[in-house]
Image (cartoon, rainbow, N blue to C red):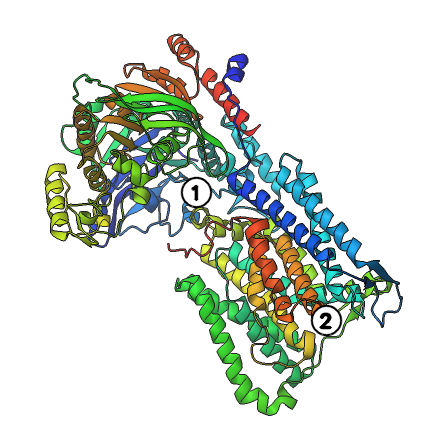
Amino acid sequence: MTNATTGGLRLEGITKRFGSFTANDAVDLDVRPGEIHCLLGENGAGKSTLMNVLYGLYQPDGGQIVVDGEPRTFSNPKQAMAAGIGMVHQHFMLVDVFTVAENVMLGREGAFVLNKERARARVREIGERYGMPVDPDAVVEDLPVGLQQRVEILKALANDAEILVLDEPTAVLTPQEIDELMGVMTALRDEGKAIVFITHKLREVRAIADRITVMRRGKIVGHAEPGTSEADLAEMMVGRAVDLRVDKAAAEVGDVRLQVSDLRVTNVAGVVVVDGLTFDVRAGEVLCVAGVQGNGQSELADAILGNMPVASGTITLDGRDITRANPHDTIAAGVGFVPEDRQADGFVSSFSIAENLVLNRFDQPPFSRGPALALPQIQDNAERLRQEFDIRTESISAPLSSLSGGNQQKVVLARELSRDLALLVASQPTRGVDVGAIEFLHRRIVEERDTGTAVLLVSTELDEVEALADRVLVMYRGRVVGIVPPETPRDVVGLMMAGVPYEEAVASAENPTPRAEAVATQGAAERGEHA
Amino acid sequence: MSTVAAARTPELDVHESRDARRARLSAGALLVALGAILAILSTRTAGATAYALSGYFDAVQLPTVTVPAGPTVIACAVLVIASGIVFLAGRLPAGARTAAAVVGGIAVVLGFITWAVAGSQLPFQVSNQFAGTIALATPLVLGALCGVLCENAGVVNVAIEGQFLVAAFTAAVVGSVTGSTTAALFAAVLAGVLMGAMLAVFSIKYLVDQVVLGVVINLFASGLTGFLFDQLVQPNSGDLNSSPLLEPIAIPGLSAIPFLGPILFNQTILFYLAVLSVAFVSWLLYRTRWGLRVRSVGEHPEAADTVGVSVRGMRWQAVLLGGAFAGLGGAFFTIGSTGAFIKDITVGNGFIALAALIMGRWNPVRAALMAVFFGFVTQLASQLQSLGTPMPSQLLLMLPYLATVIAVAGLIGRSRGPAADGVPFVK
């Protein structure tokens, strides 16, 4: 049906505006069957917008979509699907309370009365064919994220997609899961599918892309060959030379400031999420907590802040017991906190920048006088921090929601660092932040370390862990797998993030048994979870 | 390889969730407290309590059972406390807990009735209790089904009361004018659907806050029917407000069963429709393409949208179909009962239906069971009132609502509805 000259997908001069903002400016892209085409760009470069246009979720203001040589217009996803386009969304489009089979059949159920047996068979058949089996009767919300993503891919394949768009698919995966996904993508490519792989992670692009297209500020800024160096790719993506490493001196480690002993935390559902954690963080060092999303890191951070009740164990800060302290007390004790989900927990987006900058101190002098706010001081404080942290805004009175993600995070960090800290707890401080701002945020965190603050950094990004950590604590299922130096090879840390103890991880990293080992381990772990 | 994997698989330490634990402990404490109250009451219970199993006019007369009141209440108190202890003890299989809940529940009711009726001249009419339960539960079940459909599609419906009211009014007027209960039923269904359309237009198309909208629709329904009643119906009540009533339909054979027959198989069409509707809605929601799509737009509308399901279309259909059930429920208040409409005749039943829906956790069968429970308590209150019990009648009238609060807070715990319930879909 498809061949090299007419097959595949071409986007010609796609333009999409939201009001006065041009998200896509005359974008051209062509994707051929049997290739993995990488669309690289920072957050906000317009990649997702472009793909939503392709998928019929947005209508373009100009340009056309050509599939297999025929110009098409898609006014809804159904038409795009009918043309053979399948999309794996960054935020999974799965109904959590449905089973895998129900999710796959939704929208193309066939007869009025559901034939669940046929849907199950279809899930099994496609799963086996592409080497990614999933239990069709599993309820989606019970599945680990990696398997949920698999269901998304199965959904697209069940619909006979020939052109598969994966929007930031690796953001939520472990290194091993990423390897698996790459394997699946390669297999699909070899089957003759055209794959659009959207990402901002340079390493992955280099690993798998057949061709690379780079977007910046809504425009295509260039194409690159798979062999292009990371530094060059980063420069294309950001528009200027970027220093991917953080300059930092060796840590000058002082006394223990944060001491966590045998900490256990249970979540609302009664599941133990932090299970007997013991570690310390000393003055002047960055301890990175590495792990895949959902292995208890967020709860650990919340427990330290006092936002989540501790089941047993102790937390002390500078010798003072803060195990049962509430956030108000821990903040007063000198804990700075950069929450994982800044939109939800980091600030009040309708408040002004100046107000957000004193959210943790508005009730103390100099920002309050009795019951009244000291508005001039709040303004001065905001002006000063705006300079110091390079917060790019027209006015400090503008609502925080008017800022870009990177600048919002600068506000959070500015607020937390603008006082003397004993401990800085930062969860995913650079998630969703553009490369330029990442550089800045990292530098500030290292500077804070150098003033003698203990820094506990929770991150799922190995790049970030490597760049900042003085020691790396790997967490898996609420437990410490090991505490290792930051020079530990990436694949060892990756295996540890899947629960493999350090010695074994070193052994299997040295004589690389293929992925099968890691996959089997993970499969067993997943089964263990549901047993 | 496998040994390595096995060694590495950590045991996931799953405790009873905090919510489940709280629900279990509060249910246990509640039962123990109720048992203690019964035990105290038993000391002041004298005489005997008579339970009449048959009504005065039943074809087959079953005997009247008389029990000594004091010992019976004591026995019930012991059973209730024992079942409470089962809950408090924890670590028991779910089956034992269910059994304890059933035993405890029945013992509470029995002990309470025995105490309340002790020494009364008249026996407690058991068949009357069940017949009344069914009559009161019929509109509640239909109303709850309306809510189940709307809310599974993601539209909060607090306007069931308004839908009831307009349907009740329409049924009375159309029944009076045409003299046909069939025409009245169809008119009521149409009225319910039109009220549903009003909810749909403002919530789905104009994205109005659904709770506020529901309240407004209820006020609108009350005002509209009140106005028409005063201006039009009241002055001509002979022509416009004297509808024929739905006749009970005896199911041959089954209706002759002693005790159960007259209660379950000699009812109006509305009762049979309500029972069938529960099965129908259940089938529709969980076994058909339509139901899968409805639930998907209530849970994750964006996901449904990306696979080509029309979110707004499904919501419209669900709300309109729900309106049909609310219309049937509304008809009960006029042509299923006295045939005449009076202002605000539905007296909050729409809200009780809503409570049944939430306590039934958005599931048609469970919602219907909760509706029956409310019917039971309401009927109990009115029976005890007529028997002249030691409890003040005002307190008895509170009983259904007290039961609601206790059930919601203690026994049900936090319940989780459709994730996108009440969230407008904007593309």
Query: Above or below — where is A229 with respect to B77?
Result: above
- Residue A195 appears anywhere in the view: no
| Tag 1: amino acid | Met
Of badges 2 and 1, nearer the viewer stands 2
Chain that bears disc 1: A
Residue of label 1: A93
For residue A165, the mark is: none
Left or right of B292? Residue B179 is: right
Residue of label 2: B388
Identify the image quadrant of residue B343: bottom right
Residue in front for this viewpoint, B277 or B47: B47
Residue in front for this viewpoint, B2 or B182: B2
- Residue B109 appears anywhere in the view: yes
| Tag 2: amino acid | Gly
Residue visible at 47% across and 20% down in the picture:
A519
Q: For the N terminus of chain A, which image quadrant? A: top left
Judging from the image, what secondary structure is the residue with disc 1 in? loop
Residue visible at 19% across and 22% down in the picture:
A245
Residue in front for this viewpoint, A223 or B117: B117
Where residue A426 appears, as percent x and y from the top left, is 28, 32
Tell me how many marks there are: 2
Q: Are marks 2 and 1 on the same chain?
A: no
Where residue A256 appears, as percent x and y from the top left, is 27, 21
Q: Residues within 10 Å of mark 1 (few under 14, many from 20)?
A: many
Residue in front for this viewpoint, B156 or B105: B105
Where residue B329 appears, as percent x and y from the top left, is 62, 68
| The furthest residue to the front | B43
Q: CA distance from mark 2 to mark 1?
A: 60 Å
Q: Residues within 10 Å of mark 2 (few under 14, many from 20)?
A: some
Chain that bears disc 2: B
